[in-house]
Image (cartoon, rainbow, N blue to C red):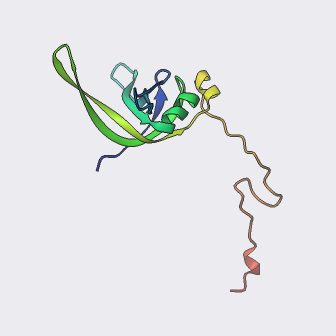
Amino acid sequence: MNSVVLVGRLTKDPELRYLPGEGTPVINFTIAINRPYKNKNGESEADYFFIEAWNKQAENIAQYCMKGSLVAVQGSLKNDRYTEHEQTRTITKVRANQVTFLSSKSNSSEGGAPTFTPSFEAPQGLDPNGFQAIDDDEIPF
């Protein structure tokens, strides 16, 4: 099984391109994920992952994400090989099956967490989570 789920922030604006001849959209970007601990110098460290997405998803990422955007990526690991200066090199990427936007474009530029504003008023008699209190004395059993 080859499956990975990552949540992190884009390290720079994503790069959208179209494959020559086919016109298929593909986007590449990198996300950073902070480690949950600090090193011996008391500094936080991060891991960086290369992400690749295709088709309509690639166009949506280009339109709605920018440096600092918080995203969740579900996909699979993929090794790409290429030759550079007569040496074969391998790069490991995440081929995204699904990318979920966890922050808005405006919040990303500020570096803040997304805010949630409910778009409805809870009816009277309901608590904020939408549950109504039940009087157990009226239940016949």
Q: Residue at x 50, y 35 (%)?
A: 71
The image shows residue 46 at horizontal and vertical percentages of 39, 26
Q: Is residue 35 visible?
A: no
Left or right? Give the position of 62 relative to 88: right
Query: How many marks can you see?
Result: 0
Residue 105 versus residue 132 in the image, above or below: above
The residue lying toward the viewer, choosing from 139 and 55, is: 55
Q: Residue at x 61, y 22 (%)?
A: 110
Residue 48, percent from left and from top: 37, 27
In this view, the residue in front, 5 or 59, is 59
Which one is nearer the viewer's eye here, 53 or 1? Answer: 53
User: Which residue in the rendered view is the most extreme toward the bottom?
Assistant: 141
* Left or right of 14 in this view: 4: left
Give the x, y percent position of residue 45.
38, 24
Residue farthest top in this picture: 85
Quarter where residue 108 is shown: top right
Please report the residue visible at 80 percent of the width from the left and 50 percent of the height from the top.
121
| Quarter placement of the C terminus | bottom right
Question: Is 126 located above or below residue 33 in the figure?
Answer: below
The location of residue 65, given as percent across then percent down, is 55, 29
Q: From this viewpoint, which residue is outermost toward the right?
A: 124
- In screen coordinates, is 105 left or right of 76? right
Query: What is the quadrant of residue 116 in the picture?
Result: top right
Residue 82, picture quadrant:
top left
Residue appearing at x 31%, y 39% in the figure: 77
